[in-house]
Amino acid sequence: MSEFLDAAEAAYWRSQWDLAPGVTYLNHGSFGPPPRPVQAARRAWQEQMDAQPMDFFFRRLEPAWFQARRRLAGLIGADERNLVFAENATAAMNVLAHSLPLGPGEDVLLTDHEYGAVQRIWRRAAESAEGAAMRIAKLPLPIETAEQVVDAIFAAASERTRLLVVSHITSPTAVTLPVEAIVAEAKRRGILVCIDGPHAVAQLPLDLERLGCDFYCASCHKWLSAPFGSGFLYVAPQHHARIRPPLLSWGRLPPTRLETWSDEFIWSGTRDPSPYLALPAAIDFLEQVGLDRFRRHTHALAQYARQRLVELTGQTPIVPDSPDWYGCMAQVPLPPGDAATLQRRLWTADGIEVPIVSWNDRRWIRVSCHLYNSCQEIDRLVEAVRRGMKDEGKGTECRI
């Protein structure tokens, strides 16, 4: 049985997005646009806020905030008491770095596949503490087994390692890392673990309580297709007392008393909370599709993209062709050349939005697939890449 949705159903779900005409958007992994029902839910909350701010902030916000958190907790297998909203995974990671300052002689360990902004966060944290350091574990290439990954990470750990930060799905390389085995080994060694998970929400089934990590940072504007500005921080119960918002406000609107660690994160002034409150609409939308069906369909698209690009380039991806190693995103190496020039050409000449990145001294393409994408769009991408590489060989660049 095909993993793709049937043609009529796929067309229906594609129609739920308002994408710009003439654009082939294959970059949901960077910025995932919300479908129409989610846009409508966000607008409805904004209209309530604008129509009667006192009623919204003093009477409606907190009940809606708790209800949205409850729905999110059910999706990701978390106790709602362990969750707070954050604008995105990067904001959540900053909360963590603010709350857990490194001590003299302590290290934080990341992998060489970690997102650049996260590296910057922990580099600054290490520079702020005398004798602290950020260490990088280099993962093997190609990656063939979970044991290779675990061994490489912990070969870089030491008695100085206080915290391990590791992506659930890597941003530059789109690899699903074996976080269960990584968390288990870290716990055995007494090392705290933060999972950087912006790509995992909806793309993978999650059960954070069973996973047993200390912290989990994520964005919901990616595969869940919630509004931009929606994400969360998960904190295991033993760490609640240590986590504080960098921006201190009322927490709860007076005269409500602060009773739990998460109360401090509810009221931070007049920020627009509609992205958080629209999260249930995003969950409803994907549940209508069926989360398993969504994952199978989008993986089939990503697999098709990977196969076509491998046929074109003759290059070998860094992980096996298996849903154990990648989901809705596929990353393929490209022949040598300038990444920025090719990405610019794909956009200006062909209207294709897809990241071409330089990583590990090579050039790569990362194709993200969501319900609004199709095999025809991937075919268009492959032909555009073919033309772009041919023109590179001629020493010409399109500047349309």
Image: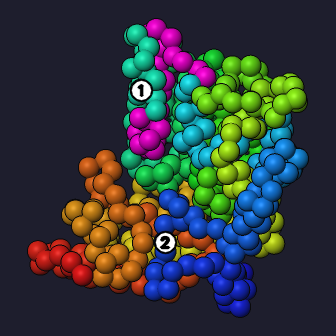
First in sequence: mark 2 vs mark 1: 2
Residue 395 appears left or right of 359: left
Mark 2 lies on a secondary structure that is: loop
Q: Is residue 102 visible?
A: yes
The correct choice, above or below, for 122 with respect to 202 in the image is above
How busy is the neighbourhood of tag 2: few (under 14 within 10 Å), some, or many (20 plus)?
A: many
Residue 216 appears left or right of 23: right
The furthest residue to the bottom: 8
Q: What residue type is labelled 2?
A: Leu
Q: Could you tell me which residue is drawn at 50 percent across and 49 percent down? A: 170
What mark, if any, has residue 29 been given in the picture? none
Q: Does the magenta stretch include residue 357?
A: no
Q: Tags 2 and 1 in contact by the CB under 8 Å rule?
A: no
Q: Tell me where the magenta segment starts and ends, as one range.
A: 99-120
The residue labelled by disc 1 is 124
The correct choice, above or below, for 187 with respect to 297 in the image is above
